[in-house]
Image: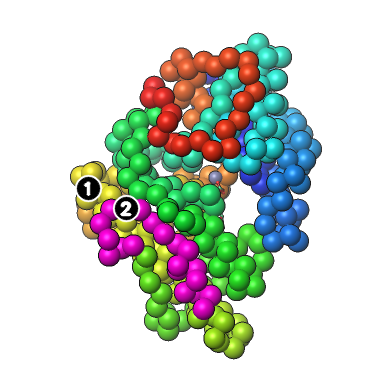
Amino acid sequence: MLILGIETSCDETGVALYDSGRGLLAHALYSQVKLHAEYGGVVPELASRDHVRKTLPLLQDIFQQAGVEPRQVQGVAYTRGPGLIGALLVGAAIGRSLAFAWNTPALGVHHMEGHLLAPMLEADPPEFPFVALLVSGGHSLLVRVDGIGRYQILGESIDDAAGEAFDKTAKLLGLPYPGGPALAKLAEQGTPGRFRFPRPMTDRPGCDFSFSGLKTAAINTWRKLAPTPENRADVAYAFEEAVVDTLAIKCQRALQETGLQRLVVAGGVGANQRLRARLRELAAERGGRVYYPRLEFCTDNGAMIAYAGWRRLAAGQVEDMAIEVLPRWPLDRLPAV
Ligand code: KG4
Ligand code: ZN
């Protein structure tokens, strides 16, 4: 079954062709980072307009790369939510219309389900059940996953998402947008042990997160220091260490609570090298394993949407012709297949 995937929930236009027999045939991504950089964050209206400009040319590229014809497509998957409403509407309108023109089914995919299933695109995919840590710019979730659409939320952020905390802290440290990768890069030069920030909510039972206090602790420390590169790197190091430590403690708790051995890590912050190393250690200590998507599929992409769409379309899920997006959409409301 050949599926076209379209992702336009935020500031990346991602498209992909996934074939259930042959795997991923082609994918392409256009990042709007440069467009939004001068504003220090995503400007929703500019994002929507850029998706309008980029989606069709990117689609032409992947059909050419894959050497397949549009009429061979057997299903179209687009991101229905959560995300920016205008950006979502672009992908939904294009996806729905193409499916109509090609007389093939279309399905709106949950963006976080896409992230959660992204490791399944790799050669050695995880089997159900597993615990998933989903850490992106908009969400921090720990989920028990028993199958497609069988999700039990074990914990979530009560304030900032992990990626959001990275981005806000980076901005206050004067780093360019997008802050997460910039802060992580700077932290590589930091001095271990110079500062220690709190590990929020680790002294309380449960798997919920809170990152806004950590951001404040980092900023208060930074404001009392001379703004030298060394000081900035040391604050970045301690901030990243505290986020990684907090996420690791909660993952350990989730694995313990569920008695599961497999941990899946996905979403943009899953690209963080210190987090990856730390969770790999943690899983090994427990005799389990951690699964990641390849780095480029940790952040937003069309491949994960094509894959998630295929799992649902192949299971017979259908939808009507309406173009409806869901900027807010709880992950645990999805139907099981
Ligand atoms: O999943 P994603 O691409 O988009 C959303 O669905 O939000 O995640 C983007 C988030 C941003 O907050 C970005 O700063 C963060 O992931 N991020 C990172 C790294 N790479 C991306 N955070 C920490 N370290 C990184 N290496
Ligand atoms: Zn995402």
Residue sitting at x 32%, y 56%: 250
Type of the residue with mark 1: Glu
| In-image side of 229 versus 292 (left or right) | right
Asked whether the beta carbons under mark 1 and mark 2 sit within 8 Å of each other, the answer is: yes
Q: Nearer the viewer, residue 59 or 42?
A: 42
**Magenta segment boundaries in residue numbering:** 201-220
Residue shown at 38% from the left, 39% from the top: 124
Can residue 89 be spotted in the picture?
yes
Instruction: Pick out the residue farthest to the top.
Output: 103
Q: Is residue 88 above or below residue 131?
A: above
Q: Is mark 2 within 8 Å of ligand 1?
A: no
For the point 54% across and 57% down, which residue is it?
Answer: 164
Tell me which amino acid carries mark 2: Cys
Rendered position, 5 above or below 255: above
The image position of residue 26, as x and y in percent, is: 61, 33
* Crowd tier of the residue under label 2, counting other residues whose Cα lies within 10 Å: few below 14, some 14–19, many 20 or above: many
Examine the image and state in which quarter residue 202 appears: bottom left
Q: Nearer the viewer, residue 250 or 6?
A: 250
Q: In whole angstroms, how far apart are the C-alphas of marks 1 and 2?
A: 10 Å
In the rendering, which numbered label is found on residue 257?
1
Identify the residue position indicated by label 2 in the image: 207
Q: Is residue 65 left or right of residue 311?
A: right
Left or right placement of residue 82 versus residue 157 in this view? right
